[in-house]
């Protein structure tokens, strides 16, 4: 495992336990229990206008868990060799994106909320923001 060799086939959807009763549901993520990295940052993306897409970058070191906290969207992953797409629409499912994967997120449903758990603080130097740079770096 590493930036160059990481593949889209190592990015998977994990089912997280849902504690459900007649008054609603709770889903819990805890460091070192049911998430495979230490969470240093949480952010959420919302108010995405219809037809907009997000992402369009890769990371050198960052691990992320993406959750559709509300609504749905598609996540397109690309490791420079292979592509894989995931549809997220359940708050008790998380997509693990490992380092070295180009991602774009599209088809946000109205009012959707994308919740992201990340393994590090915001570091602009961890981003690769152009696809051609990404392809060069993966060689
Ligand atoms: P970016 O990660 O490029 O957004 P997306 O992948 O959703 O399209 O971030 C968009 C802007 O927000 C960019 O100017 C950096 C800023 N930002 C932070 O300041 N801190 C953060 O934790 C994140 C995720 C973004």
Image: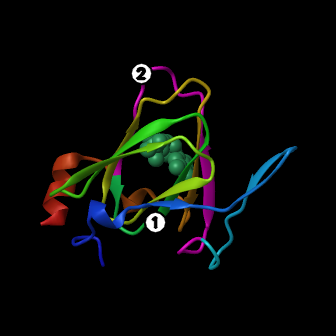
Above or below 8: residue 21:
above
Which residue is farthest top? 50
Residue at the image point whose x is 56% and y is 63% from the top: 121
Image coordinates of residue 122 in percent, x first then y, are 52, 58
Q: Nearer the viewer, residue 26 or 59?
A: 26
Q: Nearer the viewer, residue 43 or 88?
A: 88
Task: Confirm whether residue 128 shows in the render.
Answer: no
* First in residue order: circle 2 vs circle 1: 2
Displayed quadrant of residue 101: bottom left
Above or below 114: residue 133:
below
Residue position for label 2: 51
Q: Quadrant of the C terminus?
A: bottom left
Q: Nearer the viewer, residue 109 or 25?
A: 25
Residue at the image point whose x is 77% and y is 54% from the top: 26
Give the total number of marks visible in the rendering.
2
Residue position for label 1: 63
Crowd rating for badge 1 (residues with CA inside 10 Å; few <14, some 14–19, many 20+) = many
Residue at the image point whose x is 59% and y is 32% from the top: 112
Label 2: element kind: loop
Residue at the image point whose x is 68% and y is 71% from the top: 30
Per the rendering, the mark at residue 93 is none
Label 1: element kind: loop
Above or below 78: residue 29:
below
Q: Which residues are magenta?
A: 35-57
Q: Quadrant of the N terminus?
A: bottom left
Measure how far apart labels 2 and 1 are at the Cα level.
27 Å
Cβ at disc 1 under 8 Å from ligand 1 = no
Relative placement, left or right, of 31 versus 76 is right
Which residue is farthest front? 22
């Amino acid at each position: 495992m590493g930036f160059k060799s990481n593949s889209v086939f190592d990015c998977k959807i994990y089912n997280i336990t849902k504690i459900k009763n007649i008054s609603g549901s709770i889903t819990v993520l805890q460091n070192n229990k049911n998430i495979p990295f230490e969470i240093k940052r949480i952010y959420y993306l919302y108010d995405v206008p219809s037809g907009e897409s997000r992402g369009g970058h890769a990371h050198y070191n960052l691990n992320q868990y993406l959750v559709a906290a509300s609504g749905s969207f598609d996540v397109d992953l690309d490791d420079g060799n292979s592509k894989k797409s995931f549809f997220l629409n359940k708050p008790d499912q998380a997509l693990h994106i490992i380092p070295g994967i180009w991602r774009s997120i599209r088809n946000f449903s109205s009012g959707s909320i994308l919740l992201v758990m990340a393994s590090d603080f915001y570091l602009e130097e961890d981003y690769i923001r152009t696809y051609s740079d990404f392809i060069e770096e993966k060689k």
